[in-house]
Structure formats: structure tokens, C-alpha cells
Image (tube, helix red, strand yellow):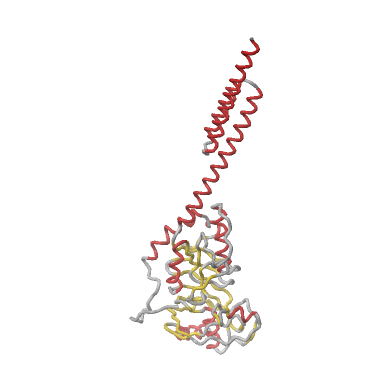
Amino acid sequence: MMAACEAVAAAAIVATATERAEEAAKAATTGTVASAAVSAKAAVLSSGGKKAAASAAVTETTAATTAAAGGAGAVRSAAAAKLLSLSGVFAVYKPKGPTSAELLNQLKEKLLAEAGMPPQDGNKRKKQALKIGHGGTLDSAATGVLVVGIGKGTKMLTSMLSGSKKYIATGELGKATDTLDSTGKITEEKPYDQIKQEDIEGILQKFTGNIMQVPPLYSALKKDGQRLSTLMKKGEVVEAKPARPVTVYSLSLQKFQPPLFTLDVECGGGFYIRSLVSDIGKELSSCATVQELTRTKQGPFTLEEHALREDKWTIDGIAQSLERCMPLLSVEPSVKKLKTEDSKVQAASSEDKTISQVREKDGVIGTS
């Protein structure tokens, strides 16, 4: 009789422990680690035995792990929601090396990884969960401000393409290359010893204001749907595009240490710094090519104040940048006027190539 009573009591204890363990598991599914732990410990106390205690301890560990995983998932979900809610225009720093499209891919990958979202493929026709684009291409050899649109901000990039931009460009006299910069093959060499500082300063006025400019052969302009630069690399013969109207708001010589000369340029859209430097060389009865190029400002965004470095490419970092940058768009007009002109100036880009928008390889909005 005594044995039967002890068996009933033991069964009751185990049943109570099981009930407590189930409570622990239920608490775990809600993502509450503390509740899961308390319920699991209650299961231990209710068990009254080592075997039940061991079982309850396992349940406690499992509950805590499940709750932690649930909590991490909730954090990722919140990060993804915040990322997809970002909308507007900001600026990042582009170093020398990657193309503008490659840099945007790096930015997108970092943000998606932080949000716990899967990478996006480059299918242009497939709707992208995260929309990111840039407002004016910088050559791979160039550095400086790259304006980026995120979310609905990608629709604002057209105005950035046609807006004013500032550059610091260093040219080298006596050499010409097929790309008009230091990345190309040397095609011509001429003397430059006769050129003085006042000679350069004396011709800059010819390249200021509303002028006509022939784009470089190595450019993102297109022929039959293909970029001229791509056709050139294939060895195909490419005819120069006709000269087109562009605008230079200001142009000054900052330094002259032969054969190098440094220019400070503010221009509109569609303008090529490489063509400018080459044309200056020809005007001086020599030749010249770009050695260094930095975009110091685009629209209201400056290199010093607004261009995010890579260590700031986080969801929170971009959210804070949007808060600083967006109000500036209503302060400074994207298209400037020449001081000597009353008429409206319809601008054009500088080393950003052209105003027409195209899709980059990953479906990013950019310029051709």
C-alpha cells in the first residue's frame, strides 16, 4: 500500500515538472529569456528528483537559446524595417579604384548584411527590395563626393545630375593619352618648357561661361546602345561625338609646378574635366592629360562635411546623414546661373559623363 502511494506521489511530481517545463518552452517562443529561465527552474524545484532536475536544466538551456534566437531575429527584423524606410539623398566618399557602380554595390551589400537580408541579384527587371542609385558617375581613377539616392530618393537624382559640381584637377603638360587621363596609353609627347604660369592664366577665360566641348572618346556616351569606352576597349573605331554646349561657372589656376598644374573648377552637368585639361594643353601649343581628379562638391554636399567614409556606411549612419543632408536641398538650387547671365542656365555633368540615366549592372540608377 505504501509503495503504491509513493508511486502516485512520484507520478504527480513528474507531471508537475513536465507542466513547468512546457511553460518554460512556451515562454521561450515569446522571446523572453527571463520568463523561460524562471519556468524552467520551477520545473526543477517541482521535480523533486535528479532525473527530472536534469531534464528541466536541459529545458532551461533550450528555452534560453530559443529566446535568444528569437530576440536576434527581432533585432534583424527591426534593422531591415529601418533600412527599407530610409528615403532621400546623401553623399559618400569614393576612393580611387572602384567604379561608381562597384562602390554602390559595396554599400548595398554592407547594408543588406547588417539588416540580415539576402543579397540582391543584378537582374534589372526584377524588383529590388532596396533601391540605391547615384547622381553622377566618377571615373574609377577619380575620388571625392558621390551623391547617393536611397528609396524614393532615387527619383531625385536627375536634378543632381544637372546641378553644379566643383573639382580640383591636376593636369600634366607634355603628355597626351588615349583616355585623357593617367590610366591610358601615351599617344603623344610635346615640349612644355616654354609655358609660363601667366600663359595658363591668360587662356582660362576662353574655357569659362557657356562654351562648346567635345566629349572624350573614352566615355560613357553611347553608340548603338554600347558605351564608347567599351567599343574602344574592343579595338573598334569610334568617331568623336560632336561638340555640345556646357557651362563652366568658375575656373582658376591654383598651382603651377611644371609639368604639373592644378585647377579649381565649378561646372554644370555634361562637362568633362578630362576634355578641359586636354583642350588647355592644345591651346598652349602642347598637350596635357589629367593626373589627379577630386570632386569636392556636388550640389550642396561637400567633401569635408557630408561625404560618408566607409566606416560610417551603417543603417544608423545613413539615417543620420539623411537628417543632415535633406534640408540642404531646399536651400541651394541644383542649377546655378552665371553671374554675368540673366538667362536660365540649363546645365550639364562634369566627369559624371552625361545627363541620361541608365541602369548599372546591379540595377542601380546611374549616369551613362
Horizontal and vertical percent position of residue 132: 50, 63
Residue 317: give x, y in percent of width and height. 49, 55
User: Furthest residue to the top?
Assistant: 1
Q: Residue furthest left?
A: 342
Using the rendered image of the protein, determine whether residue 292 is visible from the camera's viewpoint.
Answer: yes
In this orientation, which residue lies closer to the viewer: 207 or 194? 207
Most foreground residue, 120 or 251:
120
Residue at the (54%, 38%) spot, across then down: 29
Quarter where residue 24 is shown: top right
| Residue appearing at x 42%, y 78% in the figure | 347
Nearest the viewer among 304 and 270 is: 270
Determine if residue 258 is in view. no
Point out the residue furthest to the bottom here: 285
Total labels: the figure holds 0
Image height check: is 126 above or below 241? above
Percent from the top left, x then y, of residue 164? 43, 73
Up-down: is 187 above or below 22? below
Q: Quadrant of residue 142?
A: bottom right
Q: Quadrant of the N terminus?
A: top right
Q: Position of residue 63 (x, y in %)?
A: 58, 35
Left or right side of 101 for 186: right
